[in-house]
Amino acid sequence: MRPTDPTFPAPATLAALPTPSLLLDVPRMDRNVARMRARLARLGVPLRPHVKTCKSDRVARRILGGAPGPITVSTLREAAEFAALGYTDILYAVGIVPSKLPQVIAMRRQGTDLALVLDDAEVARAVAAAADAAGVTLRVLLEIDCDGHRSGLAPDSDALLEVADALRSPQVVVDGVMTHAGESYSCRSDDALRAMAEQERAAAVRAATRLRAAGHPAHTVSVGSTPTALFAEDLSGVTEVRAGVFVFFDLVMAGIGVCRTDDLALSVLTTVIGHQRDKGWAIVDAGWMAMSRDRGTASQPLDQGYGLVCDAEGRELPGLLLRSANQEHGIVGRRDGAPGPMPELPVGTLLRILPNHACATAAQFDGYHALGAQGEGSEWWARFRGW
Amino acid sequence: MRPTDPTFPAPATLAALPTPSLLLDVPRMDRNVARMRARLARLGVPLRPHVKTCKSDRVARRILGGAPGPITVSTLREAAEFAALGYTDILYAVGIVPSKLPQVIAMRRQGTDLALVLDDAEVARAVAAAADAAGVTLRVLLEIDCDGHRSGLAPDSDALLEVADALRSPQVVVDGVMTHAGESYSCRSDDALRAMAEQERAAAVRAATRLRAAGHPAHTVSVGSTPTALFAEDLSGVTEVRAGVFVFFDLVMAGIGVCRTDDLALSVLTTVIGHQRDKGWAIVDAGWMAMSRDRGTASQPLDQGYGLVCDAEGRELPGLLLRSANQEHGIVGRRDGAPGPMPELPVGTLLRILPNHACATAAQFDGYHALGAQGEGSEWWARFRGW
């Protein structure tokens, strides 16, 4: 069972942890953060990390060098949790709807500089009306569609200016634009990633330029995804970069070529609970409840099942995958065609599974066992969840 | 945000709930429970519901007619949570490992009749040694493999008797066998389901018969999965049936033919937050964080995407699916080839999404908004999670 006391003493060894548990290799995380910071420093653009990945104050402060922001969030729950911890500069990067405005206005009144995004004229009118009625200033970014992936206005569309005009109010600041190149996850080469980063930048800058020409302030040009942030060669005109999963990385990111598997900072500690030796299976106590149902590598050239299998110290066991998962059972076996025999892995053996998708796997746990370095034990870093 | 007070007053309407929220249609749940109870009553076998699906006292008591057990659990956390609520007759249906025995022995000392399962001689010896050392009686079922799906001993194997013999101790009761026909989820016809139910029954009874012949008590013959429980025609020799997902049902169960979509008791309430009208998309605030990443219908004849779309009252909107999902965004669109236009669905429209897999979707939430009947408002029924 998880510790109920978030400050419980660090166990001496991994063997003292319950399984399944979520392990966070802090030195690897620090290395990943340093890489992103160095990259963006060279491009001269600040980072606004997306805390939907970590949902943890301890992790967020580590990314931000101890500062309480700026951050990006995906839910008002994240905004409220971080605001309660003293974070003030928060971008809520999912389209606002009128039913959520009372919460937003309450947070603004409490002093949180919570910026909103939207891409719809009707919503824009509702935001302006709510800000006017409340006498509260709301800062808004228009969401731009740079790649056909999801939400947003086309940067050259008439709708862009129509939505901005619908926001005209003494209480609304049309502060700029935000876009997210979600299609970067489908890129299959460094060149494709560089091109996608430029496509993301160009769309956002183009939209902001048009807004300014129409008389809107449009100070902020916010772009980002982990792959484009790490492969952008020029961010001229961009004022901030958002990225989340780079903190931990995962097998999907490794499959895109954005990191190596030994950059992965998250893993799930699990115990071998049985075997079907005639099938070459070891059964472990990490099923999909621990790993999540995410199979993001299934559409990549190298399908990693429910995760790559490492020994307790985090060294990859070549050719071994979590091949399938039930709720609380995982089946470890060899990748199809892998050479050599299945290792013995007696009942009780501890293994670590590297996840397909850090955001999804971390969300299955209430916190991280943060490991300083081998043999140093761990601290409990709490996560929250919900909406 | 979710209510922090588990007894908060029922909101007058769904519009007062945050989105995404997990809705539980209690009349549908009651109907599903009554169907299972009637089926098993006809077969003369008691139900030991699997509470890994609901992880909720309120739901479990509703299944059990108010009684605190018997129940099946998939984690020691579930065992401890239910034991703390007064449930005493608990089967922990995932293979025990020596590292978890101290928790088991502590629960036994606190008066919980917690039965264990195992399928390994080395584990059996460790269980006998731990029971002897603690002076605590442990009740053990041998796990039987009836379908090649996962764990368990073949019912005719030498290993079955070897493992049972390894348990010989004054402190261990070899109380019988348990098996789970997980392959029933792959059945594609009623005849196949009936055959699978008989295969499950026969394997368990055969194994128990061999144990008794070898001098073990083997009183308990525990079988179950929702599909086999509902399609079994004869359960001679079986002493209890385990099943979990029948309480809520889901699209995977509907795809197997075990229920209809209007039996589904769980849905995710979501708000339309935008559109890409040229693509026929409505964007909603239920992404994979709300629905889970489960795509269990992808391998069925009818792929339901991330879920079927209903209006706020729960009426299916024909041809509409949650076609894809990011963390906090879902994309609603027409099923490929569906006739008719995309409905308007203005921003702010409330929808309900029926999930692929009830266990996985429910696990994404801290509780259920339990709806009595249309217009009656809701109660908050808490869930727990973790290990």
Image (tube, coloured by chain):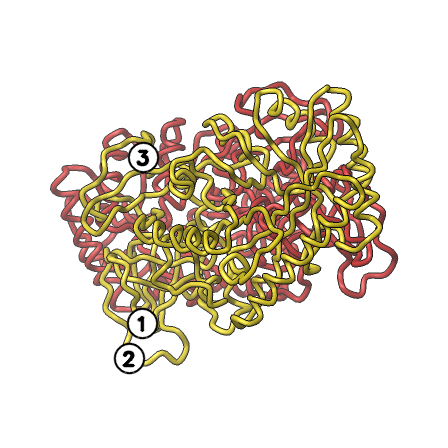
Chain colours: A yellow, B red
* Mark drawn on residue A3: 3
Query: x, y percentage for residue B66?
Result: 51, 28
Disc 3 marks a residue whose amino acid type is Pro
Residue marked by disc 1? A318
Q: In which quadrant of the rendered view does residue A147 lie?
A: bottom right
Q: Residues within 10 Å of mark 1 (few under 14, many from 20)?
A: some
The kind of secondary structure element at disc 1 is strand
Whether callout 2 and callout 1 share a subunit is answered yes
Q: Residue furthest left?
A: B133
* Residue B21 seen in the current view: yes
Mark identifier at residue A340: 2
Between A383 and B72, the one lying in front of the other is: A383
The quadrant of the picture occupied by the N terminus of chain B is: top right
The residue marked by circle 2 belongs to what chain?
A
Q: Earlier in the sequence, mark 2 or mark 1?
A: 1
The chain letter for the residue carrying disc 3 is: A
Q: Is residue B175 left or right of residue B133?
A: right
Q: Amino acid at mark 2?
A: Gly
Q: Give the secondary structure at mark 3.
A: loop
The local crowd at label 2, few if under 14, some if 14 to 19, many if 20 or more residues have their Cα within 10 Å, is: few
Q: Is residue A20 visible?
A: no
* Label 3 CA crowd tier, 10 Å (few <14, some 14–19, many 20+): some
